Image (cartoon, helix red, strand yellow):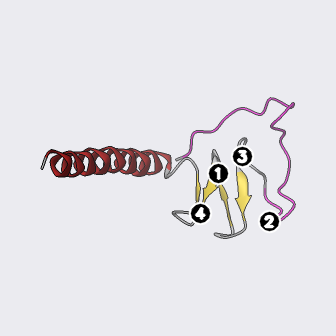
Amino acid sequence: LFDHYQYDDLLYTNRLCPTTKIRKLARSKYDRFSKKHVPRFDHFCGWLNQAIGEQNYRWFLLFLMVHVFMCFYGSWALGRVLYGEVLE
């Protein structure tokens, strides 16, 4: 199910999670809000109120792209309206 990374014994060691006492996957982190391990943990997003990891990273990127598009579209539309007002 998950993309398992190898333990390199430098950054990612084969050890138990101190919170749940289960073996941690490499690049995973325990999320105290959802109370589970998040594989390939990237960050906790306050806008979405959830941890961003392997299962929802694509949806997070789509969320960002939609918002960037909406900012450009809103700026363009506002510019058109204000430009029309200046010409009058």
| Horizontal side, residue 26 vs residue 76: left or right | right
* Residue mark closest to the camera, 1 vs 2: 1
CA–CA distance in space, label 2 to label 4: 24 Å
Q: Residues within 10 Å of mark 3 (few under 14, many from 20)?
A: many
CA–CA distance in space, label 1 to label 3: 16 Å
- Which residues are drawn in magenta? 2-22
- Which residue in the structure is indicated by mark 2? 20
CA–CA distance in space, label 1 to label 4: 9 Å
Instruction: Pick whichever, 59 or 79, lies toward us.
Output: 79
Q: Residue furthest left?
A: 88
Question: Which residue does the image show at 71% across and 46% down from the upper left?
Answer: 25
Question: Which residue does the image show at 38% across and 51% down from the upper left?
Answer: 67
Name the amino acid type tagged 1.
His
Q: Secondary structure at mark 4?
A: loop
CA–CA distance in space, label 3 to label 2: 13 Å
Locate residue 8, reporting x and y percent. Answer: 80, 29
Q: Secondary structure at mark 1?
A: strand
- Which residue in the structure is indicated by mark 3? 25
Q: Earlier in the sequence, mark 3 or mark 2?
A: 2
CA–CA distance in space, label 1 to label 2: 20 Å
